[in-house]
Image: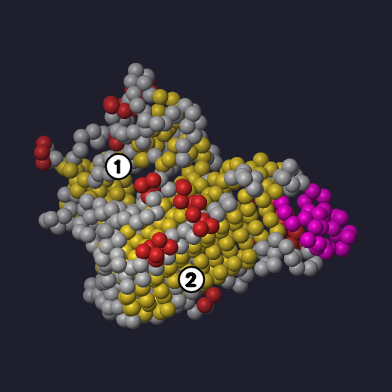
Amino acid sequence: MKTRLLPLVAAALLAGPFLPAADAAEFWAAPAGGEKAAGTAEDPLSLVAAQRRARELRRLATEPLTEPVRIILRGGDYALDAAWCIRPEDSGSAQSPTIFEAAPGETPVIDGGLALGAWQKLSASSRSAASAAAAGLPAAALDKVWVAEVPLVGGRPREFRQLWIQDRKAVRARTPNTGEMDRLLTWDKVDQHTTIPARPGMTGDLGALEMVIYQQWEIALVRVREFTRIGEGANAAVRLRFHQPESRIQFEHPWPAPIMTEAYRAPFFLQNALCLLDAPGEWYHDIAARRIYYWPRPDEELASARAVVPVQETLLEVIGSLERPVRHVEFRGLRFAHTAWMRPALAGHVPHQAGLYMTEAYKMLPPGTPEKKGLENQAWVGRPPGVVRVEAAHNIRFERCRFERLASAGIDAERGLRDFAVEGCVFRDIAGNGLQLGKFMDGGEETHLPYNPADDREVSARLRVANNLITDCANEDWGCLGIAAGYIRESVIEHNDLSDLPYSGISLGWGWTYLTTAQRDNRVHANRITRFGRILYDFGGIYHLSASPGTWITENALGGVVLNPYAEKPHWGHIYPDEGSSYMIVRDNWTETDQRLINTKAYGLTWERNGPDTSAAIRDAAGLQEPYRDLLRLLPARTAPTP
């Protein structure tokens, strides 16, 4: 590439170590790169310095560049203390995109975690063990549990809600243990309390105790304010009250809610107290003492294991404005890992659907709004963060990237997107949604209102999500999905492989409305979705909401449903057009059984040739296409792609 720069005198004044040679189009970065390095493979820059030199190359060019500008990341951990920002000044062009890519054969990890130091085993005879026992640690755990000191972050103690040991997520100390839940005894909406069975051993500090409640198609996570034992012997119970603001929201909102009938009482579990640490793989963080307690699994050697807690919530922001979007930027072969999400520790987490948490919600008496006469509830929702946040950006592409070990969402691509692509990527071990796409009426607008912005540039259009491996998402917020798409248009979700999901696989649409919205002309095609609906109910492999003219759902393969015994009833479908779903075509989808669920008046809904008799050729062609099938080796044997 040849580029004419500013006049010679100005170039000479600016050059030094900060300006590349006139024909340079690549800058190398490394975790320990220098600010004034040459920017070569042998003498790499820091990531920020490499990015700024690429900016300078474009800023000082007097003619448009005609070749890509590459920032090549050497392998290693890029530990961030703030989000890495891509701005309009980093924009490329169709002829000269800005590309951030992994060096050949190397693995750069954009990391939001903090590695813990040395672990020490508690001994039943040690002073530290005596102190732990006094604080509530079960006696059986004294010779099993190890302790690590947590460093200060920014000079202050920091709370953590996740811990990974050798890249495997540990379990916050809980009761009952993983795979089991208790049942609520009572649920008092007026007095805002619940009662639960009394369990032995609930002693010590319970000030950070949390309750996770099973609520049909979502969970609720509420922080316990009051823990009062009532009754004696076989009739012993515990009354719980919760902190605000989540207590008000949890008891006022009608949907989803804990089901309480004579035949069914909502399941729950308690977490986050030292007295609950009673099984391998469990941990507890004593924030005041800056200690983490952990009971190793049988195959873990803590003396040599890498233990990581998350610090940063978002690691990459690609954000422009509607007037000046970020343009033509690509990310190739990068990994993003170890993010936090702290809002549940500060305000609880009471989601409406798909992980969108309610900030206000209540039942209306009498029901009805101008837009929907039968609406009996109103809600305002917020949006969980993603490890990557994209807004007001055109021609952005993620290819062969990996998003793993995250406390909230993977990619959060919201408003003002055009020609956005995610292909050949891996989304795995994610607490929330794998991908969040488009608008969900989050923020200040009531969430049931139809989305029709006055400025059409706000609508996200021409998104492509294809050939991605999406597994073990929503492993904390069970109501989240592999792919959660709100109001988008002219977009394609195709040839993805989704597995091991507690609720639905792909959700498209929002609003629960038959009215006209910005949602239309989308395509959900040839995805393979297996082992979904593993915990909740009222789900679908592919779930759809609201009118969507010109939308096609075709040639997907869905099966391998494993129903949870805690579900109130088997309320689900391989494909589930829910309220408002209209003016769309659902055709030629292979499903393992004839189980279907259609909860809509179905205006203009074409439903043809869906079921187990659909062609085996369609079933076998679904999922990853040939150039990306190597990603399947990352799946454990039990999630093999055949439904």
Q: Which residue sits furthest right?
A: 9
Image quadrant assignment for residue 42:
top right
Report crowding for label 2: few under 14, some 14 to 19, many 20 or more residues within 10 A (C-alpha): many
Q: Is residue 446 left or right of residue 190?
A: right
Q: Position of residue 278 (x, y in %)?
A: 30, 33
Which amino acid does the dot numbered 1 rest on? Answer: Thr
Quadrant containing the C terminus is bottom left
Q: Residue at x 32, y 73 (%)?
A: 609
Q: Is residue 444 visible?
A: no
The coloring applied to the image is secondary structure
Q: Is residue 208 visible?
A: yes
Quadrant containing the N terminus is bottom right
Q: Is 67 above or below relative to 429?
A: below
Q: In the structure shown, which secondary structural element does the residue marked by tag 2 occupy?
A: loop
Q: Is residue 249 left or right of residue 472?
A: left
Question: Between marks 1 and 2, how big is the CA–CA gap?
Answer: 38 Å
Q: Position of residue 327 (x, y in %)?
A: 63, 66
Q: Which residue is mark 1?
A: 178
Q: Which residue is mark 2?
A: 491
**Residues rendered magenta in the picture:** 1-27
